[in-house]
Amino acid sequence: MKMSEYSNNLLAIAREVQATESKLSLIAETTGSQFLIQPNSEKICLFFHGFTAVPEQFALIGKAFYQAGYHVLIPLLPGHGIAGEWNGDNPPPLPEDPQIYQEFGRHWLEIARSGGKEIIIGGLSGGSTLAAWLALEYPDRINKTLIFAPYLSGSNKVVDLFVRIFNIYFEWWQDPQVASFGYDGFAMPALRVFLDMGTEVLEKAQTQKAAPMLIVSSESDRAVGNREHEKLFNAAVQLQPKSWYICFDDVWDIPHNMMTQAEGNEHVDLLISLTLAYVNSNATWAEMVTLCDRLKQVDFPTAIAQLNLHGRIASAMATIMGIIDTSIEKLRD
């Protein structure tokens, strides 16, 4: 199949980035930016990996979107993935200025928009904080935003205060049973960047319309504050009715690093199915609430027909309505 001009441009950019990264000393061969380019498509996904991590985090969901017909861009975040003897005296070269990440996000969004007609952006943790910031800054340029476990605050307010005040070096606690992508530690000001950006996101969401957001949270997440996820959703949905909120119950045991089985999510296939179902649906949250209530009385096809939702709800949604219903109940509590 002949490649479109857009595909050729993306391929050229991918090769340029990979050539530049090949001159760097990276942690591993799989550390650098990852690109999956369709021969001819106007649909594109842009994913931002987590703080201190690498693009490999999004390889699995990236493959799923590629198989669904999307170009997939997973760029290496600034200062990430560099090999070195990092420690408290020599911390990894992570940015301590939010504008570095924001300009990086703008740059890649413009690349995606250069020929894309359907733009999906997403991220995990700090990467999803950046995605949420872009969704608020450029709501008319993004079709949907996938916000996985955004770092808007920590799970403990004392820890947040610690992040804001101290300039120490911190090492992640590593579970020997799961994989770890990226750096083992960081200087605290580098994390403070995302805490500040998260605060800005929460404030802007009160008054600014965002691109439609799928906000994914987990009760088993010990790293970030779920209440802030609810706060972001409750603000966003008022101005953007097609925003959805999913919170996995403790029974699923889905960790903060939820994008791969290697990092501890045994239900990553479910997460990917849910994400694709959201992208392929066109319903408001209010309609989803009504659908969940109707499903307590009739089966899925009947409810879809009664509510005139045929063609606006992905068929795959039938198998995950229970998770959505649980999320609705959490918001009602």
Image (cartoon, rainbow, N blue to C red):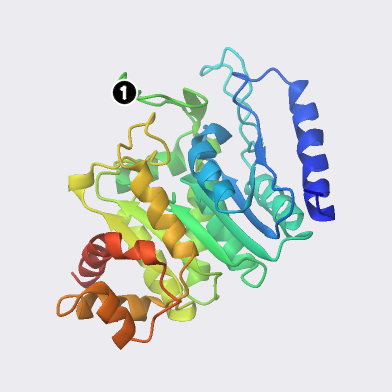
Q: Position of residue 167 (x, y in %)?
A: 50, 32
Q: Is residue 190 left or right of residue 3?
A: left
| Residue type, mark 1 in image | Asp
Label tally: 1
In the image, residue 322 above or below residue 242: above
Q: Position of residue 31 (x, y in %)?
A: 60, 26
Please identify the quarter of the rendering in which residue 311 is found.
bottom left
The one nearer the camera, 19 or 81, is 19
Residue 84 visible at all: yes
Q: Residue at x 35, y 23 (%)?
A: 174
In the image, residue 190 above or below residue 156: above
Q: Residue at x 76, y 38 (%)?
A: 14
Q: Residue at x 55, y 71 (%)?
A: 210
Q: Position of residue 118 (x, y in %)?
A: 64, 64
In the image, residue 91 above or below residue 103: above
**Which residue is under mark 1?**
175
Question: Neighbour class for label 1 at 10 Å: few (<14), some, many (≥20)?
Answer: few
The one nearer the camera, 158 or 69, is 69
Which residue is at the far top?
A: 85
Which residue is at the far front?
A: 1
Q: Is residue 188 left or right of residue 222?
A: right
Q: Quadrant of the C terminus?
A: bottom left
Please identify the quarter of the rendering in which residue 41 is found.
bottom right
Mark 1: which secondary structure? loop
Please identify the quarter of the rendering in which residue 86 is found.
top right
Q: Position of residue 265 (x, y in %)?
A: 33, 37
Residue 75 visible at all: no
